[in-house]
Image (cartoon, coloured by chain):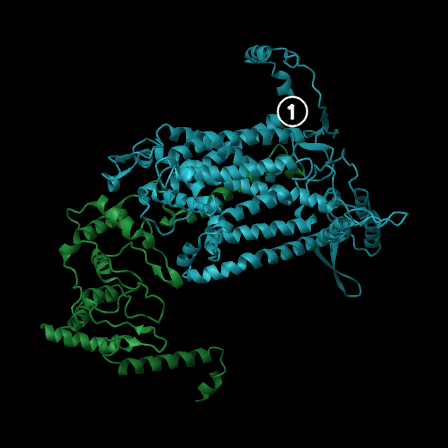
Amino acid sequence: MKKLSTHRRHPLAGLVVVLLGLVVAGSLYAAVRPAAADGSSSSDTDLIAEGRELFVVGCASCHGLNAEGIEMQSGSNNGPSLIGVGAAAVDFQVETGRMPMARPDVQAPRKEGMYSDEEIAALAAYVASLAPGPAIPAPEEYSTEGASVARGGEFFRTNCTACHNFAGAGGALAEGRYAPPLKGVSPEHIVEAIVTGPQQMPVFSWLEPQDRKDIIAYLERLEEQPAYGGSPLGSLGPVTEGLWGWLGGIGSLVLASVWIGNNGVRAGKKKQQ
Amino acid sequence: MSAPTTTSGSTSAVAPAASVPKRPMKGAGAVTWLDERLGLGGLAKKQLRKVFPDHWSFMLGEIALWSFVILLLTGVFLSLWFKPSMAEVEYMGSYAELRGLHMSEAYATSLDLSFDVRGGLLMRQMHHWAANLFLASMTIHMLRVFFTGAFRKPRELNWIIGLALLQLGIVEGFAGYSLPDDLLSGTGLRIAEGIMRSVPVVGSYISFFAFGGEFPGDDIIPRLYVVHVLLLPGLLLGLIAAHMLLLVYHKHTQWPGPGRTNNNVVGFPLMPVYMAKAGGFFFIVFGVTALMGALLQINPIWMYGPYNPSQVTAGSQPDWYMGWLDGGLRLMLPWESELFGYTISWNVMIPGLGLMGLLFGVLGAYPFIERWITGDKREHHLLERPRNQPTRTGFGAAGVTAYGLLWIAGGNDVIATQFSLSINTVIVFMRFAVIIGPVLAFIIARRWALSLQRHDRELVLHGYETGVIVRSPEGSYSEIHAPIDPSRAYSLTTHERRVPLEVSASADANGVAAPGRGKERIRARLSRFWYADEVPKPTTAEIEEAAHHAQHNGHGADGLDGRERHVGIETGGFVGGDDWSSSESDSSSSSAKR
């Protein structure tokens, strides 16, 4: 005890106490928190039941215990109803990490996924069991075999670039919402987004399966193609070009004129003075 | 050291052989042959000895000149392949992502230039970067001229020619941006068309006239092409020539300093010094443009796709020089009214037409406004440091701030996505900032300039802080101030002592009020505002007094840089624009009489 009393005024004492407190609180939470269900059942009903269990733990606080959505007094949704959104919506939102949201916000950002593939399948099965909706697309729905890149480009420019930008670099929408960049998005998720219209995105119901494949082929080509003409500067259009023109171009030329202006016939003599 | 050589303005008809050494130089025969036929020797002899003063900021306009040369060179290359036609063709070039699509011939040939013509993409990108640099360098050159007062008599007309160059450059750039007929340029044209339509009553007629019918029609590209490669470059070339001839005629302004007066130019001759500097600078500008063209992608038209009025892309922005107008459109409140059955789109008209008119109206009128307020009708060939004209500097800073904020607002969507902000917040913030920012900038810049004036006065009177701390026998500490270099003291005190205008006698002997007094009173008030709080530069008596004081208190820095204590007194002799030419001048420098 003597040791404790001599060290309690040590400059690091406060830090040690806080650390200890955190460790204790963390271990207690780990011991008490509900264990995540593991997906190992085979039959559909089991899967749905398992999905419901997961749903109640991870999703119900916003979407309601029966996925009916929670309406706020202000009329806005705490979380929208998920009845009829289909398995494709669940697969897209959860697999891209958008759901569950880290905090209430105008839009859920893409982030590291929280659930394993089996858990996502269970959640999707549960939501799909509530009402019919778009199913998770089969691989042949997003394979780009035989797809036309040029046709896909036309569909992309007509339907997608207004929000997602000509190179799929993303763009701003009202009130802090945005169309995210499309780089690195898997073909499966692109089809799911087109058919379910996640977040601010409309459902592009008029795009036929072949059109979607063509769009995917075009996007893949955009990612594969070399950067013709040098660094694309973020593919954000003339804003970054202007920034480079001023900072890089005029900046270096002004430096050059300072250099020329200070180094003339007299420069050598100046140094001798 | 010898006095500066003075070349007199008159040059007699030249005798070509006179300056040739005994052993004839190589090529002298050819030069003589030419001179005997063209008689350019006399002109060349005079102009090659033309003296230009030396300062880095005098080379900014040169960046514009050289980027214009690059624009001409690369533009000629592009025009060999580009077909300004809106006829529909099927693209069969090597960019597979667009192969088989129907598009205008203009867009197809732009793609060919990018992918199938050897070096074409590099030329396209250099042309575009050079255009961005051309306008940027004109802008900074204009700011240099503004902030140093180089627009004053006799250079007002050249200032206006410069403004015309900037305006034509903007239009020329926009025409070029529109030519490839890609999605971005078509969107830009659509906005230009919207601005045309916002002209009350005749707007739709103007639009139909320009586009030869309903937008987009198939006339606009060939028309813009003629404007872009013939009309505007011709005008630009002519005005650049006029701009530079006036520069030669007026002679270049110079910074004040020992030996530099309002009646001479101290510097180096065109040949060989400025020939080498300017020639070298061309290669630097060319090199920077080539590097940018090779390494940084600009206007990737193949990504935008052919223009189609039903399509648009996020991040549709004009090139930087139109960005501030786009910003005005994005910030403007949605005002619209209907008068006698005509819709007046204030929301488009005010920013679209008003801002451009406001900028160039104010800039064009500025030299005359300042001249009227200060009542200064003399010729000026010596530049002013921005700090010595606090009110002008304040207005300049306010203008730069307003422009910069509008410019930032033109990229509001990119700012919103890149900095995770709400675009609505950005717009609301900018709406206020565009009004408040310039006022703050005016106040801050003006006070800043006045503080710098105070600092200069301090330097002249009490010298610079040496950083040497001495302890007196009593134990107190003080820092030694050493007198500054006499030539520096001269430069710091050579500007004029300015007094606000007074209202002249209110009535004559018979008690009849002088005509136009109200106007004069306004002018006197403006002039008082113009020069308010100006820190008077030290008088000779004050400097002598300060030097004397320093000597007695042992403040001087004996032997600090080998200078005597009484240097401070000497400084007094250089105050007030005395002609003090001979001892500092350099044998290689020369000055020409104005």
Residue A192, horizontal then vertical, whole percent: 21, 60
Residue B7: quarter of image: top right
Q: Is residue A149 left or right of residue B301?
A: left
Residue B24, horizontal then vertical, whole percent: 59, 11
Subunit ID for the residue under disc 1? B
Q: Is residue A53 left or right of residue B116?
A: left
Decide if residue B60 is in sight here. Answer: no
Q: Please tell me which residue is depicted at 24% across the width and 79% down the height of the picture.
A: A65
Note the chain letter of the cyan one.
Answer: B
Secondary-structure class at tag 1: loop
Above or below for B85 versus B451? above
Q: Is residue A160 left or right of residue B209?
A: left
Residue B443, horizontal then vertical, whole percent: 64, 57
Q: Please tell me which residue is depicted at 72% across the width and 32% down the height of the picture.
A: B264
* Front-most of residues B97 and B36: B97
Task: Report which residue position mark 1 lands on.
Answer: B49
Above or below for B506 versus A18? above
Q: Quadrant of the N terminus of chain B?
A: top right
